Image: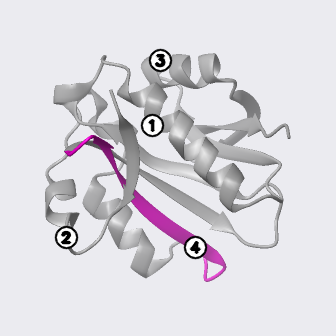
């Protein structure tokens, strides 16, 4: 396995739109199309920047993940829209992609002290992944999702 994050661009966006989770997971994560729309629409405000990535194993696209952040902060670094295509789930891609995303954020933003994400209470698979990785629930709830945090230790 050789997992890499590559920016979603005009060269791969159509392939990214084909990524799907299982029917049981549909309510847990936005489609790639919705995530890509956020880059342009900026639903969280003008200060929030979005960077969408395709998750690759060598040349094979296996998933999608997006980073949203507010510059000049220490704790507004978010992972969202994270999905592994249903054909590739259960093969270690989620953990590998999460590792790459966290490394990328920490290297790019040395002021980052905390990475956040949201997860539905019913999404036990994602919660188990995040818990094993070191994310902790904050007790904060956004809509129907719990906010979890990963303390960045340097």
Q: Name the spot of residue 107 as percent of width and height, x first.
A: 69, 54
Q: Dot 1 lies on which element?
A: helix
Most common SS among magenta residues:
strand
Residue 115, relative to residue 24: is it above or below? below
What's the residue at 67%, 61% (across, down)? Answer: 108
3 or 2: tag closer to the N-terminus = 2
Instruction: Give the Cα separation between the discs numbered 3 and 2.
Output: 34 Å
Tell me the CA gap for discs 2 and 4: 21 Å
Image point (72%, 37%), residue name? 149
Q: Which residue is mark 2?
A: 11
Marked residue nearer the N-terminal end (1 or 4):
4
**Dots 2 and 4: beta carbons under 8 Å?**
no
Give the Cα distance between marks 1 and 3: 18 Å
Q: Identify the magenta region.
A: 44-59
Q: Which residue is mark 4?
A: 49
Asked if residue 141 lies left or right of residue 86, the reply is: right
Q: Nearer the viewer, mark 2 or mark 4?
A: 2
Q: CA distance from mark 3 to mark 4?
A: 29 Å
| Residue, disc 3 | 124
Residue 97, numbered label: 1
Q: Which of the two discs, 3 and 4, sits closer to the camera?
A: 4
Q: Residue at x 64, y 53 (%)?
A: 105
Viewer-nearest of labels 1 and 3? 1
């Amino acid at each position: 396995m050789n997992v890499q994050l590559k920016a979603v661009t005009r060269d791969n966006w159509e392939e990214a739109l084909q990524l799907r989770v299982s029917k049981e997971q549909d309510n847990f994560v936005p489609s790639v199309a919705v995530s890509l729309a956020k880059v342009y629409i900026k639903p969280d405000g003008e200060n929030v920047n979005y960077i969408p990535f395709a998750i690759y194993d060598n040349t094979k696209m296996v998933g999608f993940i997006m980073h949203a952040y507010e510059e000049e902060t220490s704790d507004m670094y978010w992972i969202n829209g994270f999905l592994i295509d249903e054909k590739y789930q259960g093969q270690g891609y989620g953990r590998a992609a999460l590792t790459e995303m966290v490394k990328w954020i920490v290297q790019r933003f040395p002021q980052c002290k905390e990475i956040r994400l949201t997860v539905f209470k019913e999404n036990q698979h994602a919660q188990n992944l995040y818990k094993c990785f070191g994310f902790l629930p904050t007790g904060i709830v956004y809509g129907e999702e719990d906010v979890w945090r990963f303390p960045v230790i340097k």
